Every structure is written in structure tokens, then in C-alpha cells.
Image (spheres, rainbow, N blue to C red):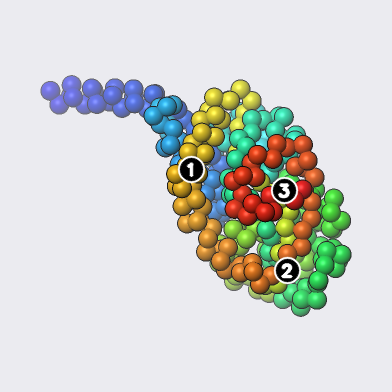
Amino acid sequence: MKIVLSIICYFLLINSLSAQTVFTTRGPETANDHRYEYQHRLIELALQKTVDEYGPYRLLQSRMGANTKRAMVEVEQGYYKNYFVANAVTPERTQKMVAIPFPIDLGILGYRVFFASTQTLARLKSVKNLDQLKEFSMVQGIGWNDTEILKKSGFNVVEASNYHGMFQMVANNRADLFPRGINEFLNEWEANKKIKNLAYDENLILYYPFPKFFYTTKGNEKQADRIMKGLVAAYKDGSLQGLWQSQYQASIDKVNMMERRILSVRNPDLAEIDPSYAQYFYFASQAGTH
């Protein structure tokens, strides 16, 4: 009798797993990389909100180690089942892949503070305008859209492949500034503050509108619709904002934006993009600054 029950339970489990739709989110680049945890939890929230309409799901993560450029290639090629990766909005991406037009971090990533060496910070204190800021080099990751935005705005940009190494680069004066979103700042400072000579600026913010969308493979429109419906539902009932605040509010508060000078540049990638995403921006007054 026990054997019969075990067999029945086994087949029930197999049937249950087969009825679940598998989704995949981006895994970390390194063991100490926590940047994509919010994205994973956000996809999970969207899936939870849509179970009644679309059915059960199973959420996985991609293998560790892929940088942003590689992750987007994997999305375009459909490397994983129902693979959703967040990245900046560009016309090219919206044409090559299926984009979900919801700014996953509510547009807050467009506000940047600077990691730098203690020597660079002493020079940075005298900066009052964009022309003066352009005298400082910026380090960015290979494949990051910030690189082109900053270059087109007249900045000297140094590209690097290793995320954690960029903090070392500015601490060692191999580049002047490493701009990071005010939502990313606190976790990154806590993770890297033991690096000798690393510090952060407390006076400036560089702003450019920078919505990030989830992307998935062409042909995956049905599951993209599910994620969009789930995100909007979570936004309307406040659960998305609750997740967002639990992840980012402490960092935003630590930055103390009201005491900083904000310098703005354009994001030319948004000129051809439907601006309806901006209704979900945390600071709606900045949403239209293209």
C-alpha cells in the first residue's frame, strides 16, 4: 500500500511540475553581486499577481557569470526558457526583443552619485556646472548604455569589464568617477567601503532619464503580456512600491538629494520611445527631460 501511495504522489508531483510555466531571471555576475535580486523578486511579484489568469509558474535564475552584454545576447537568442532581463531602453532593443514598457525601478536609476578616490573628491568640491564636471573621466561597464549617453554629452568614458574592479579603478585613480544610481549606492558602499582610498561625493548628482525595461525573446509576447499585467496590478495595489521601498528607500534617504546640486544631461535613446512609461516615475517632474 505504501508503495502504491508513493507512486501516486510521484506522478502527482510530476504532473504539477509539468503544469507550471518556467520563467528565468538574470543570475549574478559574481558570488557577491546582489544587483539583480530586486529584479528577480519583481518578476516573482508580477507572476503571483497573474496566477488566476495564466496559471502556476516556476521561477529560476540563469547561470552566474554573464555580464550585461552577454545576458542580452542570451535573451535575443532565447538561451533560457522565458528569460527576462532588465536593461536600459533603446530603440534597437525594442526592435530586436520584446520590451515590457514599465520602468522597473520607477526611474530612480537616472539619479547618479559618484564613487571616487579621496584625492578626486577634493577636486570635485569646486564643480558647479556640467563643463567643470566634464573635466573628470567616468568609468562604465562594457555594454552599459550609460557609456554612450555620457560620451554624447561630452564626457570622457573609460570602459571596464569587471564590475567589482571599477571601484578599485577609481580608488587607484585609474579613472576619476564611478557614477551609480542613488538606489544602488548604499549597498555598494557597504560592500566596497573597505577598499583603501575609496570614498563618495556628497555634493553632486548627475541626472539623465534612464528607465529600465524587462526584455524577453521575440515570440514570447504572451508571457511578456503576463509580466506587464502583473507589474501594473502590483503598482495599482501598492505592493510593487512596497517592494521598491524595502529595497531602495534607505539608500535614497542616505543620499540626501535635497542637499545636493543636480546637473542634468539628455538621454537621446528616448527620443523615439513612447513616453507613457513616465507615469510610473517616482519623480514625475523629471520624466520628460530627454
Quadrant for the N terminus, please: top left
Q: Nearer the viewer, mark 2 or mark 1?
A: 1
Q: Which residue is mark 2?
A: 261
Q: Which residue is mark 3?
A: 288
Which badge, 2 or 3, is on the more N-terminal residue?
Answer: 2
Q: For the residue marked with disc 3, what is the amino acid?
A: Gly
Q: Which residue is mark 1?
A: 236
At horizontal 59% and vertical 71% (from top left) the residue drawn is 194
At horizontal 72% and vertical 76% (from top left) the residue drawn is 118
Question: Residue 107: x, y in percent?
Answer: 63, 50
Q: For the residue marked with disc 2, what is the amino acid?
A: Arg
Task: Give the CA distance from mark 2 to mark 3.
Answer: 19 Å
Height in image: 8 above or below 163?
above
Q: For the residue marked with disc 1, what is the amino acid?
A: Lys
Q: Quadrant of residue 32?
A: bottom right
Q: Badge 1, how many Cα within 10 Å: few under 14, some, many 20+?
A: few
Question: Residue 229: x, y in percent?
Answer: 51, 33
Report if the CB atoms under discs 2 and 1 are less than 8 Å apart. no
